[in-house]
Amino acid sequence: MKEIEEITKELIDFRNARDWEQFHNPKDLALAISIEANELLELYLWKNAEDAKTEKVKEELADVFAFAFLLADKYGFDVKQIVLDKIKQNGEKYPVDKSKGTAKKYNEL
């Protein structure tokens, strides 16, 4: 997908201009995704979802995406394909006739 490739190139150019690739091994990128996801969660802590500041949500979500794209690049993953594959896999685990309208895990359906 052209857009994902463009985003990934911009991220790599940004990173390389600052000599940060040395810090971007798969383990640390995975940790960064988790940390940024927790910063996203913190925006909702002790408040109603609609009270979270939209601009901050956007910033933290962008951080999660950025590190995820960089991690995918490290492994040579095609982001579009791995997401489509996961949707197919989830479709098999959660057939509509059993999972529609319920939050039960696939092994409880």
Image (cartoon, rainbow, N blue to C red):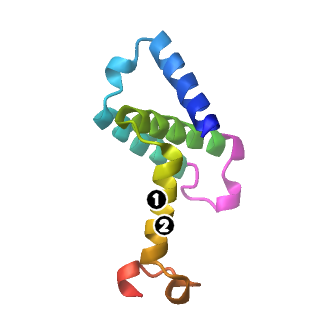
| Secondary structure, magenta segment, majority class | loop
Residue 64 located left or right of residue 21? right
Q: Position of residue 103 (x, y in %)?
A: 50, 79
Callout 2: SS? helix
User: In this rendering, is residue 5 above or below 47?
Assistant: above
Which residue is painted at 50% across and 64% down in the image? 87
- The residue that disc 1 covers is 85
7, 15: nearer the viewer: 7
What's the residue type where badge 1 is placed?
A: Asp
Work out whether residue 26 can be spotted.
yes
Residue where numbered disc 2 is placed? 88
Q: Residue at image x 50%, y 81%?
A: 95
Question: The residue tagged with tag 1: helix, strand or loop?
Answer: helix
- Looking at the image, which residue is at 48% across and 66% down? 88
Labels 2 and 1 touching (C-beta < 8 A): yes
Residue 52 as seen in the image, left or right of residue 93? right
Query: What distance separates the C-alpha of mark 2 from that of mark 1?
Result: 5 Å
Where does the image place residue 53, in percent across and percent down from the top left?
69, 47
Q: Specify few, some or many for label 2: CA neighbours under 10 Å numbering under 14, 14-19, or 20 or more.
A: few
**Residue 105 forms part of the magenta stretch:** no
Q: What stretch of residues is rendered in magenta?
A: 43-55
- In this view, 8 is above or below 109: above
Question: Whole-percent x and y of residue 80?
Answer: 53, 48
Residue 86 relative to residue 46: left or right: left
Q: Amino acid at mark 2?
A: Lys
